[in-house]
Image (cartoon, grey):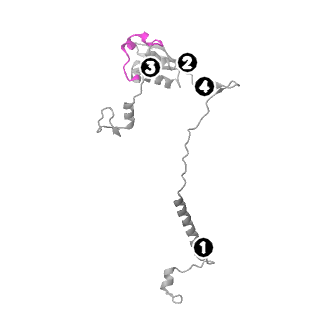
Amino acid sequence: MVPDVSTGDPTRMLCLHCARKIVSPKSTTKYGALTNYLKFRASFTNTVKLSLAEIDGIIRDNLPINAYKNEKWWNNTPTSAHAKAWMDVGWKVQETNLKEGYVVFQKAKEIQTKRFKKKAGGKEIKKPFTPVPIRIPKTSKPSKTKVSKLYARIKNIERQRATTPKYPGSFKPKPKHEKRLFKPEKKPQ
């Protein structure tokens, strides 16, 4: 949580996501949301019927009065900002019915995706999948002090193993405290 960016009030807290939106809002046109909606619908349908109220909800604002009164407002003229919203993503207005309050959008063309140059064989080459580059962390070498300590520990363990006698079979030597307390010929029963 960070202090509120818009008012500068440190007592009012915002999440970082909200603060980012306030500091750097996306610059879109009034009809940018309609453009995104039609772009999304283009992936699975060729025709979209929207009521004027639905369009108001999509753009999160009211359409101008001319949109409700005049059918010419819905013409596919590339010079108007509102028509560019649907024409730029390959849609056109097919039917407008202001009495019933709906507009039918028809997909006019397929949006061209980026393709790569053709090979001599004539087949289109799509960009191959490239994985995300991975930065392999460098393994740091241990210091000479750490190496010498480990080496000394290993040598001590080896010396300890070499000095302990090995007994054949299952004979186990007596523990030190037992040797001190009892004499070999007198053992309690």
Q: Residues within 10 Å of mark 4 (few under 14, many from 20)?
A: few
Which residue is situated farthest in the right direction here?
121
- Camera-near label (2 vs 4) is 4
Please give the name of the residue rendered at 57% of the width and 68% of the height, measured from the top-left corner: 155
Task: For marks 3 and 4, give the one nearer the viewer.
Answer: 4
Q: Earlier in the sequence, mark 1 or mark 3?
A: 3
The residue that mark 4 highlights is 115
- Of marks 2 and 1, which one's residue comes earlier in the chain? 2
Q: Which mark is residue 50?
A: 3
Q: Earlier in the sequence, mark 2 or mark 3?
A: 3
Q: Amino acid at mark 4?
A: Arg
Which label belongs to residue 162? 1
Name the amino acid type tagged 3: Leu
Q: What residue does disc 2 label? A: 109
Q: Do the residues under discs 2 and 1 have CB atoms within 8 angstroms?
A: no
Q: Is residue 21 left or right of residue 138?
A: left
- Magenta stretch in the rendered image: 59-79
Picture residue at 47% right of the left edge, 24% below the top: 36
What is the CA distance from the residue labelled 2 to the residue labelled 3? 19 Å
The structure residue drawn at horizontal position 40% and vertical position 18%, both measured from the top left corner, is 52
